[in-house]
Structure formats: structure tokens, C-alpha cells
Image (cartoon, grey):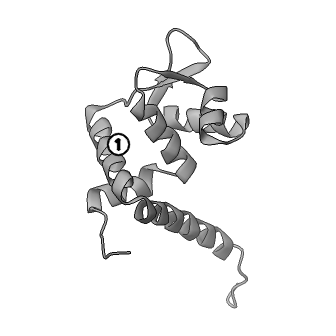
Amino acid sequence: MDNFSIPEDLRRFVLTSIPSVPFLEALLLMRANPEQCWSRDTLARRLYVRDKVAEGLLAELCLAGMAAPSSADGDAFCYRPREEALRERIDGLADLYSTHLVEVTHLIHSSLDRKAQQFADAFKWRKDS
């Protein structure tokens, strides 16, 4: 691996807005086909995840302002970033991910590892407790 450094704005975006690799994969899949509306079943098949996981991903994408329910079908969702700045940030992340998949994936996992450690640390017995 070379000494590639993820640009700070994209690093911050990943750490604050991309909770998992499946979330990113769902986002980028929807972005690649913006005219397509995605049902839970279709997304699950494309990502090789369970329907319930796909349903959760679609809900998270909507909460993040990256997707929205289809007006034609209430059970389908379309790629629809709520702001142009968010669309541009997603575009930048898509470009970065296409050339530096490992680095972006490691960044996402490092964030998850840090959160898991913080959670575990909350249950440690402290001498002064």
C-alpha cells in the first residue's frame, strides 16, 4: 500500500456520515443508477445481504438525506441527496473509493473500532470508582 492520504474533507465526511461499508456500498449503488428506485428486496439481492439489513440501510440513507422514498411507490427509494453540497461530497467519495477502496474501508472500520472500544471502556472498573 502506498502512503496515500485521504483528503481531510472526505476523511471527515466518512467519519461523520458513513456508518458502515454496507451503507457506503448501498449509497454508491444507488448513486450509480440515480434514475432507478430501489426496493428492499432489490437492494438486498444486489448487496448480498438480508432483506432486513437492506431495509435498515434504506432507512439510514433517508435519515442521512442521501435518499428519499419514491413518489410512485412507497416501498421504493431513490438516490436523492438533499443538498447539492452533499451530492458533491458523495461524488468525491465515489471517485476516491473507486481508486482507494482499501484505504476508505480501513477508515470506516477504524471508526467502528474506535466506537466499539469507547463502548467497552465505559464498562471497565476503575480503581477510583
Above or below for 24 versus 5: above
* Furthest residue in direction top, as rendered: 72
* Helix, strand or loop for disc 1: helix
The answer, for residue 66, to whether it is visible in the render is no
Q: Residue 3 vs residue 22: left or right?
A: left
In the rendered image, residue 2, in percent from the top left (x then y), is placed at 33, 75
What residue is disc 1 on? 90
Q: Position of residue 80 (x, y in %)?
A: 40, 27
Q: Nearer the viewer, residue 128 or 94?
A: 94
Where's residue 120, x and y in %? 68, 72
Tell me the quarter of the image containing the C terminus: bottom right
Q: As drawn, is 106 to the left or to the right of 92?
A: right
Task: Decide: is 92 above or below 123.
Answer: above
Q: x and y percent of residue 104 in the render?
A: 42, 60
75 or 42: which is nearer to us? 42
* Residue found 32% across the figure and 55% down from its top: 10
Q: What amino acid is at disc 1?
A: Ile
